[in-house]
Image (tube, helix red, strand yellow):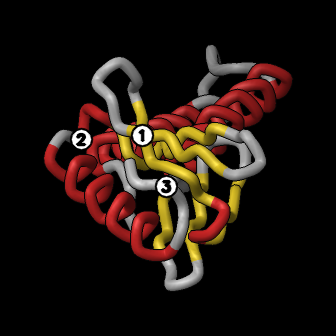
């Protein structure tokens, strides 16, 4: 499984800070004479939960390489491609992520392989190209 290390570290840290901040806020708010009202407290809980949920959603990004193909877990959806369905794997400095082009005309970005990750992205890209070339698809 390949995951973007910097993104995981930043989002994980922010999720911990938000959780701790929300906990301190809830600990201080209700009992203080000049604290938040019940409506404000509920609003803070909802807002904090949404922010933490979004951060955890971002942290699920991954690329899983299997013997039969790849599983791409991006922000919004998970996509599964067999090796024979992949035509080429593109890595350019013009794009922020590596992209996979498939036989059905789709181009899917692999958000787990950000160009900002540098060496790790280039290594995984080279491995993907080698597997696509050996198991089907066009040479890239």
Q: Quadrant of residue 27?
A: top right
Counting from the top left corner in percent of width and height, residue 41 is at: 74, 28
Front: mark 3 or 1: 3
Residue at horizontal 55%, vertical 55%?
Answer: 60
Question: Disc 3 designates what residue?
Answer: 138
Where is the N terminus found, in terms of image quarters?
bottom left
Structural crowding at the residue carrying mark 1, measured as other residues with C-alpha within 10 Å and reported as few (<14), some (14–19) or many (≥20): some
Res. 27 visible in picture: no
Q: Which badge, 2 or 3, comes first in the chain's sequence?
A: 2
Front: mark 1 or 2: 1
Q: Which badge, 1 or 2, comes first in the chain's sequence?
A: 1
Question: Disc 1 designates what residue?
Answer: 90
Residue at horizontal 70%, vertical 35%?
Answer: 50
Kindly identify which numbered label has been placed on residue 117. Answer: 2
Q: For the view shown, which residue lies furthest in the right direction?
A: 39
- Per the image, label 3 sits on a secondary structure element best described as loop
Q: CA distance from mark 3 to mark 1?
A: 12 Å
Structural crowding at the residue carrying mark 2, measured as other residues with C-alpha within 10 Å and reported as few (<14), some (14–19) or many (≥20): some
Q: For the view shown, which residue lies furthest in the left direction?
A: 119
Res. 46 visible in picture: yes
- Per the image, label 1 sits on a secondary structure element best described as strand
Mark 2–mark 3 CB contact (< 8 Å)? no
Foreground residue, 128 or 13?
128
Residue 3, placed above or below residue 16? below
- Per the image, label 2 sits on a secondary structure element best described as helix
Q: Which badge, 3 or 1, comes first in the chain's sequence?
A: 1
Q: CA distance from mark 1 to mark 2?
A: 16 Å
Front: mark 2 or 3: 3
Q: CA distance from mark 2 to mark 3?
A: 26 Å
Q: How many marks are shown on the rendered structure?
A: 3
């Amino acid at each position: 499984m390949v995951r973007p290390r910097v993104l995981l570290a930043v989002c994980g840290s922010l999720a911990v800070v938000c959780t701790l901040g929300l906990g301190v806020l809830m600990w201080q708010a209700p009992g203080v004479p000049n604290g938040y009202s019940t409506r404000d407290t509920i609003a803070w809980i909802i807002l904090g939960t949404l922010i933490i949920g979004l951060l955890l959603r971002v942290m699920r990004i991954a690329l899983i390489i299997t013997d039969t193909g790849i599983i791409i877990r991006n922000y919004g959806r998970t996509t599964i491609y067999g090796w024979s369905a992949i035509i080429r794997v593109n890595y350019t400095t013009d794009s922020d992520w590596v992209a996979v082009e498939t036989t059905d005309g789709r181009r899917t970005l692999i958000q787990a392989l950000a160009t900002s990750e540098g060496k790790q992205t280039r290594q995984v890209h080279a491995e993907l190209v080698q597997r696509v070339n050996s198991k089907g698809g066009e040479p890239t």
